[in-house]
Image (cartoon, rainbow, N blue to C red):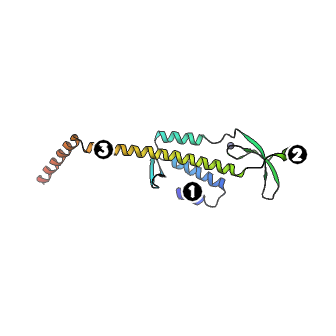
């Protein structure tokens, strides 16, 4: 699936690539664990789909832009003709179709191309931080578990159990 999206994602319009990327994220997140890169080490890490991670991902995907503030801006098309659109001031997307060209719109501010890119970069950073937060949490859990386990291996209960098991194994060995 990963390679399928990598192929599909190649040489496509940014919007299409983004949709392919989002679809790929949803597929990854539907699994019981996610294969991610640990930013602290650069190594691969299998992230368990814990309820906490699931909740954070749901909040992230629910946090898309509501286009609550926008402004009419003028945008030049490929042929150099000027058009008027509403641009969302948060995510930079155009809202609705082109507006009718009336003289009052001529003084509208210019379209901001970088707004959309900046927004998506910020969303990408937010996602990456969310993943890294859980990598750190789960790594600490693993370390905690390992420490507990080491302590157990050092304990009198374990030594006693181990001696018993070894004695029995020795007994079997003698019988054989
Ligand atoms: Zn928006």
Tell me the crowding category of disc 2: few under 14, some 14 to 19, or many 20 or more residues within 10 angstroms, Cα based: few
User: Is 154 in front, or is 51?
Assistant: 154
| Ligand 1 visible in quadrant | top right
Quadrant in which the C terminus is drawn: bottom left
Check disc 3 and report its element: helix, strand or loop. Answer: helix
Specify which label sits upstream in the sequence, 1 or 2.
1
Q: Is mark 3 within 8 Å of ligand 1?
A: no
Residue bearing mark 2: 103
In space, the residues marked 1 and 3 are separated at their CA atoms by 40 Å
Q: Is residue 113 left or right of residue 33?
A: right
Q: Is residue 100 visible?
A: no
Q: Is there CB contact under 8 Å for labels 1 and 2?
A: no
Percent x, y of residue 164: 17, 44
Residue drawn where x is 20% and y is 44% of the image: 159
Tag in front: 1 or 2: 2
Q: Could you classify mark 3 by the number of other residues whose Cα lies within 10 Å: few (under 14), some (14-19), or many (20 or more)?
A: few
- In front here: 42 or 16? 42
What is the number of the mark on residue 5? 1
Q: Label 2's element?
A: helix
Whichever of callouts 3 and 2 sits on the residue coming sooner in the sequence is: 2
In the displayed orientation, state which residue is furthest to the right.
103
Precedes in sequence: disc 1 or disc 3: 1
Q: In front of the other: label 1 or label 3? A: 3
The residue identified by callout 3 is 149
- Residue 28 shows up from this direction: yes
Q: Residue at x 37, y 46 (%)?
A: 143
The residue at the point 15 percent across, 47 percent down is: 167
Element carrying mark 1: helix
Q: Is residue 175 above or below residue 59?
A: below
């Amino acid at each position: 699936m990963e390679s399928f999206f990598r192929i599909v994602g190649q040489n496509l319009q940014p919007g299409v690539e983004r949709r392919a990327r989002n679809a790929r994220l949803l597929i990854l997140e539907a699994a019981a664990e996610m294969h991610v890169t640990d930013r602290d080490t650069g190594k691969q890490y299998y992230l368990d789909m814990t309820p906490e991670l699931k909740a954070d991902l749901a909040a992230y995907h629910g946090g898309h832009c509501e286009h609550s503030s926008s402004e009419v801006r003028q945008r030049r098309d490929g042929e150099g003709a000027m058009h008027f659109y509403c641009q969302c001031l948060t995510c930079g997307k155009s809202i609705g179709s082109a507006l009718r060209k009336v003289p009052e719109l001529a003084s509208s501010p210019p379209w901001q191309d970088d707004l959309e890119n900046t927004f998506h970069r910020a969303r990408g950073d937010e996602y990456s931080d969310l993943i890294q937060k859980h990598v750190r949490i789960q790594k600490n859990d693993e370390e905690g578990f390992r420490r507990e386990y080491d302590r157990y291996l050092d304990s009198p209960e374990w030594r006693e159990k181990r001696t018993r098991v070894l004695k029995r194994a020795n007994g079997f060995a003698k019988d054989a």
